[in-house]
Image: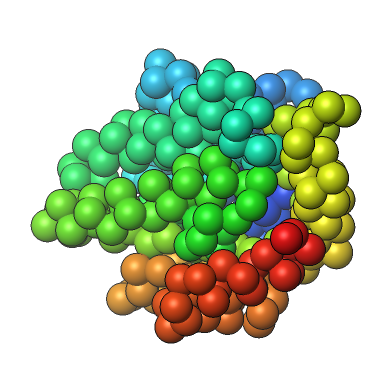
Amino acid sequence: MPKTVLITGGSSGIGKAIGEYLSGKGYQVFGTSRNPQNITDSLFPLMKMDVNDTDSIAAAIAEVLSKVEKIDVVINNAGIGITGPIEETPESEIKKAFQTNFHGPINVIKAVLPQMRKQGFGHILNITSIAGYMGLPYRGIYSASKAALEITIEAMRMETMQFGVKMTNVAPGDFATNIAAGRYHAPVLENSPYKKDYGNTLKMMNEHVDNGGDPIQMAKVVHQIIENKNPKIHYKVGAPLQKFSIVLKRVLPDKVYERMLLKHYGLK
């Protein structure tokens, strides 16, 4: 019997690439989308789910279990981007980012754990971000939401391993997806003291995404993790320099690392 995989945010970008790759490897894949009726090119079934709506999460999981007997793997991929000077970012948008990037995956995990506990096995993969390992200028809220998920999963995996449930964080760097089009951009205000620096940084961030790697790299790593009987807690997937930046943060003095980031973004 093939493994059943549920992927949140499976209609585009990294989620879609993972779903298509795993389908090609013989997995039984189900994806989710807030508006599946608008997606006509999916190679695997999409169900309606909003990770901010616990009723829709429960309904989607119930729908999967009406078709199969078990859920082997859940991939928490749904998320949103957010950029801007923190001072000028509306509180409502900050809350929305945390609601989707942090509370959303936790909601999904809470909903699927009873089934995995009943099965006696399961693997939950959380797509975080290399940005979650450092505070990046004009991406601070995004970094913080992903960092919060990373740390929470470290604790949660220790709580749930007694049930045969594995949890893994997979942190991608920049990949060529449509995340830049869908994220919240605090507007570059004409009279803002951040206008020049934020405008230049925003342009650089968009170029990084446009020139990012093929999401199929993420799909291949996720497949390897699923097939690994003893996966690591953390994986980083991206350009060598992006992954090396995490090592540098760990070994360099704080202010040296900060100066390196300022230089990279052309700030100060």
Nearest the camera: 200 or 181?
200
Task: Give the quarter of the figure containing the C terminus.
Answer: bottom right
Horizontal placement of 64 versus 194: left or right? Answer: left
Residue drawn 48% across the image and 62% down it: 133
Residue drawn 47% across the image and 43% down it: 145
Residue 115 at x, y = what percent? Answer: 26, 39
Residue 90 at x, y = what percent? Answer: 61, 22
Nearest the camera: 131 or 257?
257
Figure quadrant of residue 9: top right
Nearest the camera: 34 or 128?
128
Residue 40 at x, y = what percent? Answer: 81, 32
Say above or below: 130 vs 194.
below
Tally the numbered discs. Answer: 0
Figure quadrant of residue 21: bottom right
Horizontal placement of 61 versus 112: left or right? Answer: right
Horizontal placement of 183 versus 191: left or right? Answer: left
Residue drawn 64% across the image and 52% down it: 137
Figure quadrant of residue 220: bottom right
Task: Give the quarter of the figure containing the N terminus.
Answer: bottom left
